[in-house]
Image: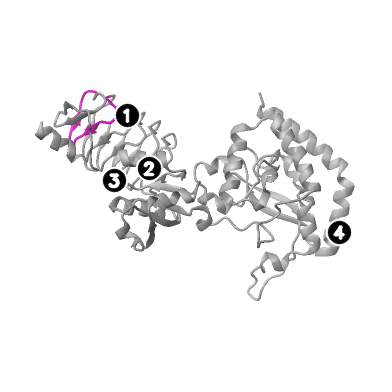
């Protein structure tokens, strides 16, 4: 087992040895930086470490301190020197980070530490890169370095978090030596350094569905300062138009041209939402409105929407691509299956379990501990006091059960009531 204690001990011992062995090289580099770039020799910057805690990372300076008339630093390509570029290509500017390793701020191997202002742009999945200590080198550094896009880099970082081992660290360290001798991927095309990770580059979220529900999803994302880039819908009469200022770019199938693109399905119909998710190759994101209240111990699956006014209490588990609509109340220890829809003002008491692809209509409620099966519909205003088996409609106060083999429900649960009357 690759324990944190073993990794920390290995880091401290190896970093200390390297600092002693490389001290003549570090001393020479110190003198060369002082000669070529002047003071200060070291570049000290706040970075984000394990669990999102900040620390000050130390590197050799590689750029001039030139500023414009207003005191703002000039572009990187103007301030970068040939000497600084050499240091970056050879990764010699990273040597002072051994001090950060010895102090316990960093590891020899891990995701590279980034700026604290990036924290607000990460998706929950991307933020998992902070579950471990940041590294002097890492999995993304030996697989493209700064030539990678931000999403690709974060994907590699999270892969390392999930697969870290002593053997993997040794492989990364040895491959890093090769990369230092034969440098590549130091920067992206057209840039001397890695472009900033900002709101636009972090998001580029596509919305699938240009109906009324799409408006709710867009508002939820924008309320979190996330950048919605495009909408896709199969209604060709909408192509070229906009929804809340976001362009409707064409049919949903166009998303297949952008594999891995971040997206969320804004379609209320559970079955259609599921079919699209199973067809498309996207990086599904959740959307949680800042005016909702989600307990820290609650778990929200990818692709799920939590709208304004919703309350989700501790230890509740919400599956993937679920809709938790306006002012829904979900008490502690509930479980909501993937592709379900809890409609506005519905209320679930503690310990309620809802199966996959089910819908709880507007204003419905469930007493503690009841189980609602998969592919079920609870009608608007209904009160569930006993468990509901799979493929069943439940309507009324208290809710009465009607068996059905072909359920189809719209977003407010009224179809369940129509089938009851027809029966």
Name which of mark 2 and mark 1 comes first in the sequence.
2
Can residue 41 be seen in the rendering of this structure? Answer: no
Q: Is residue 245 left or right of residue 135?
A: left
Name which of mark 3 and mark 2 comes first in the sequence.
2
Q: Which residue is mark 1?
A: 355
Disc 3 and disc 2: Cα gap in Å?
24 Å
Q: Which mark is residue 326?
A: 3
On-image quarter of the N terminus: top right
Magenta stretch: give its range: 370-387
On whether residue 407 falls in the magenta region, the answer is: no
| Residue 141, image x, y percentages | 69, 45
Disc 4 and disc 2: Cα gap in Å?
58 Å
Can residue 61 be seen in the rendering of this structure? Answer: yes
Q: Which mark is residue 54?
A: none
| Nearest to the observer: residue 46 or residue 133 | 133
Q: Secondary structure at mark 3?
A: loop
Name which of mark 3 and mark 1 comes first in the sequence.
3
Quarter occupied by residue 245:
bottom left
């Amino acid at each position: 087992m690759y324990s944190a204690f073993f990794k920390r001990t290995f880091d401290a011992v190896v970093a200390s040895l390297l600092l002693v062995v490389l001290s003549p090289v570090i001393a020479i580099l110190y003198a060369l930086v002082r000669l070529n770039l002047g003071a200060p020799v070291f570049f000290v910057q706040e970075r984000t470490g394990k669990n999102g805690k900040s620390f000050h990372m130390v590197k050799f300076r590689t750029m001039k301190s030139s500023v414009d008339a207003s005191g703002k630093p000039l572009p990187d390509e103007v301030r970068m020197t040939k000497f600084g570029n050499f240091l970056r290509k050879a990764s010699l500017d990273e040597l002072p980070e051994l001090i950060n390793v010895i102090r316990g701020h960093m590891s020899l191997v891990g995701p590279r530490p980034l700026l604290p202002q990036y924290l607000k742009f990460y998706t929950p999945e991307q933020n998992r890169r902070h579950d471990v200590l940041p590294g002097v080198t890492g999995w993304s550094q030996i697989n493209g370095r700064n030539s990678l896009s931000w999403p690709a880099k974060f994907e590699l970082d999270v892969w390392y978090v999930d697969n870290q081992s002593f053997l993997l660290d040794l492989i990364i360290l040895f491959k890093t030596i090769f990369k230092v001798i034969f440098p590549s991927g130091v920067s992206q095309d057209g840039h001397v350094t890695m472009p900033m990770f900002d709101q636009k580059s972090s998001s580029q979220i596509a919305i699938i569905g240009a109906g009324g529900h799409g408006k709710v999803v867009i508002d939820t994302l924008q309320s979190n300062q996330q950048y919605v880039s495009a909408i896709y819908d199969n209604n060709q009469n909408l192509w070229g138009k906009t929804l809340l200022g976001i362009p409707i770019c064409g049919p949903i199938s166009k998303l297949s041209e952008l594999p891995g693109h971040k997206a969320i399905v804004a379609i209320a119909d559970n079955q259609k939402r599921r079919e699209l998710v199973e067809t498309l190759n996207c990086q599904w994101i959740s959307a949680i409105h800042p005016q909702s209240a989600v307990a820290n111990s609650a778990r929200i699956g990818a692709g799920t929407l939590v709208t304004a006014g919703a309350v989700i209490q501790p230890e509740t588990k919400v599956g993937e691509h679920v809709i938790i609509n306006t002012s829904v109340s979900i008490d502690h220890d509930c479980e909501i299956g993937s592709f379900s829809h809890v409609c506005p003002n519905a209320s679930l008491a503690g310990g309620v379990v809802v199966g996959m692809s089910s819908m709880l209509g507007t204003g419905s409620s469930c007493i503690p501990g009841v189980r609602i099966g998969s592919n079920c519909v609870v009608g608007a205003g209904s009160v569930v006091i006993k468990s509901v088996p799979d493929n069943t409609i439940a309507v009324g106060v208290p809710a009465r059960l009607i068996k059905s083999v072909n359920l189809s429900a719209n977003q407010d649960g009224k179809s369940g009531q129509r089938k009851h009357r027809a029966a």
